[in-house]
Image: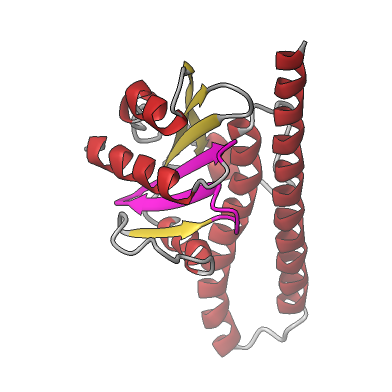
Amino acid sequence: MNENLRTQASRTVRRQEFSKRGEDARNAAKEFEIERQERAATPKTPQFIAREVTVQRMSRSRTIAIGLMVVAAARWFGLTGVTAATPVYPAQARSTASPTAEDACSVLKKEDVAATFGGAVNGPKSRGPVPMGPGMTVTSCEYTGSGYLSVTLNLMRVAADQLPIHKGLCEKQKSDGLAGLGDLACWYNDKHEELHVFKGTTLISIELRGKSNPTEPIKELARKVLAQMR
């Protein structure tokens, strides 16, 4: 019974976090729509048309990224029936080709998780690879321990033209104590329970729950994952 309550509580926390991410994405989508309407009302001078070509390319990338954030978060948290609150471009819907994503469980070793937990480990539970759009795939790996202990690794293979968007989001987050970790690293929250690291065209997301002080343990896990990656 206690285990069922812990599982239910863990799912509730993840759903609350997903709800917050979804709200952030919806707000970004509203801002995008306002910008689109303002551009539509602007007189179409030759100079404007030249600028608009560039803006449309950037806006398309940002719109896809917003949708991917919502859908990826839903899949990572194990939710179903969730779709992006932004338009899906025809080219995105038709595309089925994607690079082979590295299996998350192949780089997050059970013995490394056991050392982090300091006890028994359940798992791994693997998901993916899941196509997330043109040239993008995600795989995930989850382990659980006693109480509320859990660690989830998500590997997102990012398309080259989308990489600057994701890195730009990371650069706006805090990065204290993360110098030298991958190509770029940032904290997703102030509790240091989620860490994002870029290596090449791969975005690594590690979530460590149930540790009173997760900062150093999650960084050590990130180092071990990086060492395992090709």
Q: Is residue 138 visible?
A: yes
Q: Is residue 36 left or right of residue 228?
A: right
Q: Report x, y in % for residue 97.
A: 41, 33
**Magenta-drawn stretch contains 195:** yes
Q: Report x, y in % for residue 230.
A: 21, 38
Determine the residue positioned at 71% across, 26% down: 80
Determine the residue positioned at 40% across, 52% down: 197
Range shown magenta: 188-211
Q: Is residue 2 left or right of residue 145?
A: right
Seen in the picture, residue 197 relative to 121 is either above or below; the reply is: below
Judging depth in this view, the residue of 212 and 5 nearest the camera is 212
Judging depth in this view, the residue of 127 and 56 nearest the camera is 127
**Magenta-drawn stretch contains 172:** no
Determine the residue positioned at 78% across, 63% down: 30
Judging depth in this view, the residue of 160 and 11 nearest the camera is 11
Rendered image quadrant of residue 164 = bottom left
